[in-house]
Amino acid sequence: MIVVNVDVMLARRKMTSGELAEKVGISPSNLSILKTGKAKAVRLSTLDALCRALDCQPGDLLQYNPDASEQSPGKHAPASSG
């Protein structure tokens, strides 16, 4: 699962969501969808604008968390104790 860390960067930059939305040129509601992880896709142009506004790298905003994803084929679930 991909985790979006926009809130972390907002806090580090001491910027509000409204300020970021204005700088990036997206609606506050679309920024909220992105921040909550409900977005299914992110345009590269939006990612570019976020990085410019927050002075960061894409990896500062996006993180891969394999534990939050469904089990990959070929991986076995841990044996239950019981």
Image: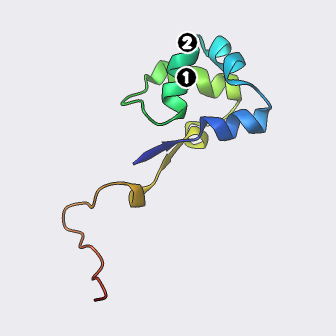
Left or right: residue 21 versus residue 77 is right
Q: Is residue 5 above or below residue 23?
A: below
State the mark number for residue 69. none
Where residue 48 appears, x then y in whole percent? Answer: 55, 23
Q: Residues within 10 Å of mark 1 (few under 14, many from 20)?
A: some
On the image, which quarter does residue 49 sit in? top right
Q: Which residue is mark 2?
A: 27
Residue 50 versus residue 36: which sits nearer the camera? Answer: 36
State the mark number for residue 31. 1
Say which residue appears at 73% left-offset and 24% top-offset. Answer: 16
On the image, which quarter does residue 59 sit in? top right
- Farthest bottom residue in view: 82
Contact? badges 1 and 2 (CB < 8 Å): yes
Quadrant in which the C terminus appears: bottom left
Say which residue appears at 55% left-offset and 13% top-offset. Answer: 26
Kind of residue indicated by mark 1: Leu
